[in-house]
Image (cartoon, rainbow, N blue to C red):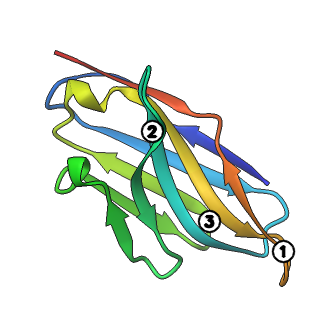
Amino acid sequence: VQLVESGGGLVRARGSLKLSCAASGSIFRINDMGWYRQAPGKQRELVAQITSGGSTNYADSVKGRFTSSRDNGKNTVDLQMISLEPEDTAVYYCNAIVQVNRNDEYEYWGQGTQVTVST
C-alpha cells in the first residue's frame, strides 16, 4: 500500500492551501485516515483525523481553519487549510489505517509534503 501526497508549497500568512493524499495497492478497506505534521525540532503531531464514516477530529490549533474530507470510493483524503499562519510551517504526512484483507490491518504513512507559511 502506498500513500502519495500532493499540494504542499509556499504560501503567505493568511493564505490557503489544499493537500491531497491518494492510497493505492492491496486495499480491502481503509479505516481511519488523517494528517500529521512535524515542524523542525518538534515531535510529529496529529492535525486532523477522519473515520470511514466521515467523523472528524482536529487539533485545537487548527480548529476552524482546517477541514479534512475523504472519498472512500477513490481512497483519497484531503486537507483544506485556510488562514494559514507561520506556525503551520511543517512537513505534513498522510496517514491511513488499512485492512489488506478481512483479518490484517496496518498503519501506513505518506512520504510527506512541505508546507511553508511566510510572514
Residue corresponding to mark 1: 104
Label 1 neighbour load within 10 Å: few <14, some 14-19, many 20+: few
Name the image quarter holding the N terminus. Answer: bottom right
Name the residue: 54% across, 41% down.
Answer: 93
Q: CA distance from mark 1 to mark 3?
A: 21 Å
Q: Is residue 18 left or right of residue 7?
A: left
Q: Residue furthest top?
A: 119
Q: Nearer the viewer, mark 3 or mark 2?
A: 2
Label 2 neighbour load within 10 Å: few <14, some 14-19, many 20+: many
Whether residue 7 appears in this view of the structure is no
| Total marks placed | 3
Q: x and y percent of residue 103 in the render? A: 85, 82
Quadrant of the image occupied by residue 115: top left
The kind of secondary structure element at disc 3 is loop
Residue corresponding to mark 3: 74
Quadrant of the image occupied by residue 19: top left
Q: Are marks 1 and 3 in contact (CB under 8 Å)?
A: no
Name the image quarter holding the C terminus. Answer: top left
User: The residue under label 1 is which amino acid type?
Assistant: Asp
Q: x and y percent of residue 106 in the render? A: 76, 63
Q: Is residue 18 left or right of residue 103?
A: left
User: The residue under label 3 is which amino acid type?
Assistant: Lys
Residue corresponding to mark 2: 37
Q: Nearer the viewer, mark 1 or mark 3?
A: 1
In the image, residue 12 sits, relative to residue 75, either above or below, namely above
In the image, residue 69 sits, relative to residue 2, either above or below, namely below
Name the residue: 45% across, 38% down.
Answer: 37
The kind of secondary structure element at disc 1 is loop
